[in-house]
Amino acid sequence: MTKPILFAATGDSFITRNLPYKDQAFHEVSRLLHRADVRIANLETTVHENEGYPSAQSGGTWAMSPPSVLQVMKDYGFNLIGWANNHTLDYLYGGLEATERNLNGYGFVHAGAGKNLAEASAPRYLECESARVALIAATSTFHPWWAAGEQRPDSIGRPGINPMRYIMTHHVKEEKLRQLQAISESTDINAFNKLLIEEGFMNDSGTDVFLFGSSRFVVSDEEGTSTQPHPRDLQRIVRKIEEAKQRADYVIMSIHAHEMAGDAKEVPADFLPTFAKACIDAGAHAVVGHGPHLLRGIEIYKNRPIFYSLGDFIFQTEAVTSQPADFYEHYGLDHTHNVADALNAMSANYTRGLCVHREVWESVIPLWKMKDGELVEIELHPIELGFELPVHRMGWPSISSDTLILENLQALSAPYGTEIQIEGGIGRVILG
């Protein structure tokens, strides 16, 4: 490899509307993306015409979009799609299978979900003039039964997402652990766990870990909560990266993760940096994160970029055209109400929720250049998604001249030792 290659990545595309006209904002964003050879998006909706039953649980709202939105994604220029996230099974297996069929029909290279674990975790390859690029996609935010199941000689696999689970442990001092133990003895909170262990359906947690309901507690001098990647999922993804680096010039890891450090949504849970660095140690050339619907910091590790979250690229939850009865019932609504009523109830007439936070509607598009496997430069282009517009028109990206977006990213990246220089409305990461 001697010819440089340029990558562009975006955060979540929760796209539910068509774009029959192409205005100036579209053309500016599309031109920016088309500067890159590799153009990556996370598709955070199912794409079909009611071809699956609504799940009993969703990723928040039940996300379903007409297949024609994929033409909009093509028009923007995307050629690599990750679709492992907390909406992938909003419409169960029928919705998953239809989404995959439509992604194939529109000619996208896509990764992160499939009819079994082997398909969901498989690297997918994009053929570029200057290089072959692999994409692996996973999510840590999902309902447990959404995880794809492994094939066996005696059983078929299960459709679903490529899971990146994590283990959460609460650290308390010995006195507090004794209090929890006393509470468990005077209540039934652990009764079912005891029965499951006795009947062989659950393993005993051992003497060092105390299960209080479904939460893990250990004695520690330093109190707090920690998370670590689940070793089985981490090992599987690492093996896939090692496979992909033998078959491609570049490997990109896409990870959808809403999990945060305490109540600081802009800071990733501590299993995420551990996971991202393990991916790069295994051979990934970049880790592209998304999920929390806002920007998180950038870290440069072994001269490879880790984008802990690129926020939103397209965000149109308010334009969904239907929701199942479960959504209405949750807000005390009935069959006399419509989807606009339900969304109004969720947002308390748009006075709460994601729609009222400006940072949700601001992000960046990074363009980074690599040559011979090494990072050469990173440009950061700020975008905004129409925070000041009426809610039904919000959600399309436009290039922004607001340097406060880049200054925010500077502050978020500083704890990782990443310096960002702002000049001419563009951010540039200072590489050592």
Image (cartoon, rainbow, N blue to C red):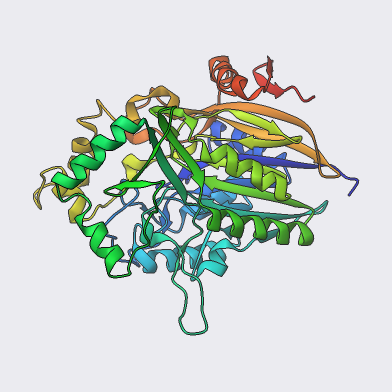
- Furthest residue to the bottom? 154
Query: Foreground residue, 244 or 154?
Result: 154
192, above or below 373, in the image: below
Q: Residue 339: where, in percent of width, then height? A: 21, 46
Query: Foreground residue, 155 or 45?
Result: 155
105 horizontally vs 293: left or right: right
Residue at (66, 40) in percent of width and height: 8
Q: Residue 148: where, in percent of width, then height? A: 46, 65
Query: Foreground residue, 346 or 259?
Result: 259
162 horizontally vs 262: left or right: right
138, above or below 296, in the image: below
Residue at (45, 51) in percent of width and height: 85
- Furthest residue to the right? 2
147 horizontally vs 118: left or right: left
180, above or below 140, in the image: above
Residue at (61, 63) in percent of width and height: 122
331 horizontally vs 249: left or right: left
Residue at (72, 57) in percent of width and height: 242
Q: Residue 32: where, in percent of width, then height? A: 66, 35
Q: Residue 25: where, in percent of width, then height? A: 55, 31
Q: How many labels does the image show?
A: 0
Task: Work out whether residue 21 can be spotted.
Answer: no
Quadrant location of the C terminus in the rendered image: top right
Task: Work out whether residue 298 can be spotted.
Answer: yes
